[in-house]
Image (spheres, grey):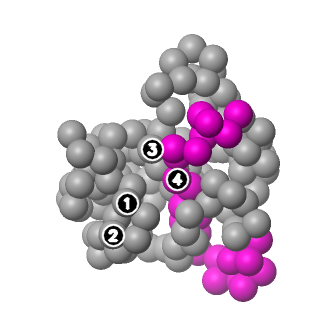
């Protein structure tokens, strides 16, 4: 599997972020994924990066739906307001415990969402994502 340069994990479950980070490292998907416990901090950091270092935007974002303050849908609304040429290189993966068909359909209405993944994340799921969407980039 080719390694993805910059990955964000956005989930309000700290333990799950730690587990997913280790899974990504074990799968050689990402060396050091950056974790966020809330979507507000993540979108604020992304917007700041757009202003200061637009080349440092993430290659992939793994985003939970159900979070306090700002949920995954609200994050996507803000993320898609960022100029397209900057966010087009970033693939968003909805990583959620939701199996609601309405959530799956809703995720398809966002141009930046590449896949809808049901938790738990696994090495096998990352390998499939890498093959399907080519998220890995050669180092």
Q: Secondary structure at mark 2?
A: helix
Cα distance between the residues tagged 4 and 3: 6 Å
Asked if disc 4 and disc 3 are in contact, CB closer than 8 Å, the reply is yes
- Above or below 109: residue 36: above
Q: Secondary structure at mark 1?
A: loop
- Above or below 94: residue 88: above
Tell me the quarter of the picture where residue 27 sits: bottom left
Asked if disc 4 and disc 2 are in contact, CB closer than 8 Å, the reply is no
Residue that badge 2 annotates: 131
Residue 87 among magenta residues:
yes
The disc, 2 or 3, on the residue closer to the chain's N-terminal end is: 3
Q: Residue at x 72, y 85 (%)?
A: 101
Residue 134 in percent (x, y) is at: 37, 60
Task: Say the numbered circle drawn on residue 59.
Answer: 3
- Above or below 108: residue 83: above
The disc, 1 or 4, on the residue closer to the chain's N-terminal end is: 4
Residue 3 in percent (x, y) is at: 26, 50
Residue 56 among magenta residues:
no
Residue 25 in percent (x, y) is at: 24, 53
Cα distance between the residues tagged 2 and 3: 15 Å
Asked if disc 1 and disc 2 are in contact, CB closer than 8 Å, the reply is yes
Residue that badge 1 annotates: 134
* Mark closer to the observer (1, 4): 1
Task: Say the numbered circle drawn on residue 91.
Answer: 4
Cα distance between the residues tagged 1 and 3: 11 Å
Q: Residues within 10 Å of mark 4 (few under 14, many from 20)?
A: many
Which residue range is magenta in the image?
Answer: 83-106
The disc, 4 or 2, on the residue closer to the chain's N-terminal end is: 4
Q: Secondary structure at mark 3?
A: loop
The disc, 4 or 3, on the residue closer to the chain's N-terminal end is: 3
């Amino acid at each position: 599997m080719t390694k993805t340069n910059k990955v964000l994990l956005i989930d309000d479950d700290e333990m799950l972020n730690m587990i997913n980070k280790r899974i990504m490292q074990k799968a050689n998907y990402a060396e050091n994924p950056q974790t966020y416990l809330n979507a507000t901090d993540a979108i604020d950091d992304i917007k700041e990066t757009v202003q200061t270092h637009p080349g440092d935007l993430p290659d992939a974002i793994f985003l939970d739906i159900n979070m306090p303050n700002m949920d995954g849908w609200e994050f996507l609304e803000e993320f898609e307001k960022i100029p397209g040429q900057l966010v087009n290189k970033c693939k968003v993966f909805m990583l959620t415990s939701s199996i609601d068909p309405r959530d799956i359909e809703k995720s398809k209405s966002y141009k930046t969402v590449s896949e809808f993944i049901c938790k738990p994340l696994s090495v096998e799921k990352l390998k499939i994502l890498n093959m399907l969407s080519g998220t890995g980039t050669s180092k």
